[in-house]
Image (spheres, rainbow, N blue to C red):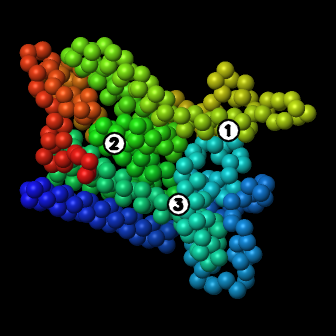
Amino acid sequence: MAKERRQEEEAWRWRGGILGIAILSRLLILALTLLFRHLASPYDSSALIDPPCLVSSTSQEPAGIADRVQDPGRRTWGRRIGAAIEGSIVWDGVYYVRIAKCGYEYEQSHAFLPVLPLTMRFMTNYVLFGMIPLIGHRATLAFSGYLINNLSFLGAAFYFHRLSCYILRDRKLATSATLLFCFNPASVFYFSIYSESMFSLLSFAGLWCLLLGAKWRATLLFGLSGAVRSNGVLNAGFLLFQAMHEAHNYFFFLNKPLMTGRVIYFAVLQVLGSILPFVSFQGYGYYQLCWTSNDDELVVCRPWCNSSIPYLYGFVQNHYWNVGFLNYFHWKQLPNFSLASPMLLLATCAIVSYAKRRPLVFFSLGLARQSGSWREAALLSLLDRYRPVLDNQGAQARSVNMPNVVPAEPIGEHA
């Protein structure tokens, strides 16, 4: 008991240190942002564009607040702070704040998925309600976005460190990886009103739940990540990867075809559950934009509605921003590729190095693993329970105890 208590205390010290590092990175980004905004004018001039909502009833401003916000006697410092916050709303933040305030008014706004603006609206109307008369409704929405994203970043760094401890089996190396995550070149996007922070938190937390064997919890988190960013639907691949290994082990090693079918059945349900939020949002857009009532008849409104599979997100990205498969590959984008080349080179070298060191595991997706390399094969809680399993040579059985294989970061219900 004493040893376990010491290990738990040490783990909490490490976690506290990670949160401290993450907070320090946010303060540094804030200082640099204020410095550069003082030295140079923002490139994006759309921050203060705020026309009235198309339909006044769609505005999500709390009732009774508008008159108080427009009160000329409102404190000067409040107006200045509100103006400064509104002046920082740029790029994607303009859309997120607008959606939080007025809902999905325009077709192009459907490129920005709903979880972040809905969370901003909830926090503004129910948590930071008292700030609205001081700095204004739009500024409070923006402040909510900043607060949500930076708190989400702290959670993302926390789960990133835990995952790194599990994968690397070395706390110091995991801490180095977390430092790189906190101080990466794109860290400003994790600070601003963008969806990266919330997406990272949901994805990392979902992966941690998957390692614990809490698949339905992981499904929920992956589904929410898909309602934050469209590429969240790719998180379903982690569920498929784990199911592939479990079905393979049940069928070939344990000779249980019925359990194999059960694994496949639940994997299909979990994958469908993880992509359902994103698909549902596409259905909402289809209902909102494609059909209008005209004397009890349905009339098609937009060209993408006639597609065999109406896909609003893809149409909006391509039509308004020319975002599509290989659309970014133009000579004029060469400077941007040059900026990204160091990270691309590092990632490529890491993949090639791993493939050379473990070709059998790499090219077989871990199925043709070597004897004794169960953990390295899939990084999952094998079969969700402690069961005797056979090694890949079928020579003998051994017991797999996943919580004890990672001295750097034990997995258990207390984690």
Alpha carbons under labels 2 and 1: distance apart: 31 Å
Which type of secondary structure does the marked residue at label 2 adopt? helix
Q: Amino acid at mark 1?
A: Gly
Residue at 36%, 59% (x, y): give it: 154
Q: Nearer the viewer, residue 38 or 188?
A: 188
Residue at 72%, 59% (x, y): give it: 59
Which type of secondary structure does the marked residue at label 3 adopt? helix
Alpha carbons under labels 2 and 3: distance apart: 26 Å
Q: Which residue is mark 3?
A: 145
Mark identifier at residue 285: 1
Q: Pointer 1: residues within 10 angstroms few (<14), some, or many (20+)?
A: some
Q: Nearer the viewer, residue 192 or 211?
A: 211
In the rendered image, the quadrant that contains the N terminus is bottom left
Residue at 50%, 53% (x, y): give it: 194
In this orientation, does residue 188 appear? no
- Pinpoint residue 7: horizontal percent, then vertical percent: 13, 56
Closer to the chain start, of discs 2 and 1, is 2
Are the residues at dot 2 and dot 1 in contact (C-beta closer than 8 Å)?
Answer: no
Q: Amino acid at mark 3?
A: Gly
Residue at 52%, 29% (x, y): give it: 325
- Pinpoint residue 337: horizontal percent, then vertical percent: 42, 40
Mark identifier at residue 209: 2
Which type of secondary structure does the marked residue at label 1 adopt? helix
**Is the residue 372 above or below the residue 198 in the image?**
above
Q: Amino acid at mark 2?
A: Cys
Alpha carbons under labels 1 and 3: distance apart: 23 Å
**Is the residue 79 above or below the residue 209 in the image?**
below
**Is the residue 312 above or below the residue 407 in the image?**
above
